[in-house]
């Protein structure tokens, strides 16, 4: 960690966050704020609640700090743990994540 970012995230790094509560309305997208010189950064997003939800994305190159909104498959509701699994080929600085409440 350096200042307001988790720097130099690479292959096979997992960031876990417990205590997430998406409630009954839930979330259907995630905003990721990051920077990377890689053309593609593979990332698996997991939400482990009553059952395991997964979303696989590739974050594109972003020479400057960028926010990208990623649609999730279906609506994620309830309480559980969120994991960001950065797969081989990933190399980035992460500035933040924000789940967007379903409209």
Image: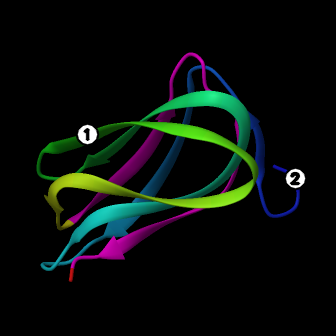
**Residue under pointer 1:** 54
Give the CA separation, mark 1 to mark 2.
28 Å
Q: Which residue occupies 43% across, 44% down?
A: 83
> Quick check: 77 above or below 62?
below
In the displayed structure, does residue 61 sit left or right of residue 7? Answer: left
Q: Which residue occupies 36% across, 73% down?
A: 100
User: Which element is circle 1 on?
Assistant: strand
**Residue under pointer 2:** 2
In the displayed structure, does residue 37 sit left or right of residue 102? Answer: right
Bin the neighbour count of mark 2 within 10 Å (Cα to Cα): few under 14, some 14-19, many 20 and up.
Answer: few
Query: Which image quarter holds the C terminus?
Result: bottom left
Residue 102 location, x and y as percent?
A: 22, 77
In the displayed structure, does residue 31 sit left or right of residue 2? Answer: left
Magenta span: predominant SS is strand
Disc number placed over residue 42 in the picture, else none? none
> Quick check: 67 above or below 62?
below
Residue 16 location, x and y as percent?
A: 49, 46
> Is residue 71 a member of the stretch shown in magenta?
no
Farthest right residue?
Answer: 3
Q: Which residues are magenta?
A: 79-102
């Amino acid at each position: 960690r350096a200042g307001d970012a988790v720097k130099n995230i690479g292959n096979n790094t997992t960031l876990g966050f417990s205590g997430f509560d998406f409630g009954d309305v839930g979330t259907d997208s995630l905003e990721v704020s990051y920077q990377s010189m890689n053309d593609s950064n593979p990332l698996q997003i997991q939400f482990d609640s009553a059952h395991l939800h997964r979303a696989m994305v590739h974050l594109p190159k972003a020479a400057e700090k960028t926010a990208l909104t990623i649609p999730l498959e279906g609506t994620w509701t309830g309480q559980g743990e969120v994991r960001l699994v950065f797969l081989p080929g990933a190399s980035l600085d992460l500035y933040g994540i924000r789940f967007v409440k379903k409209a």
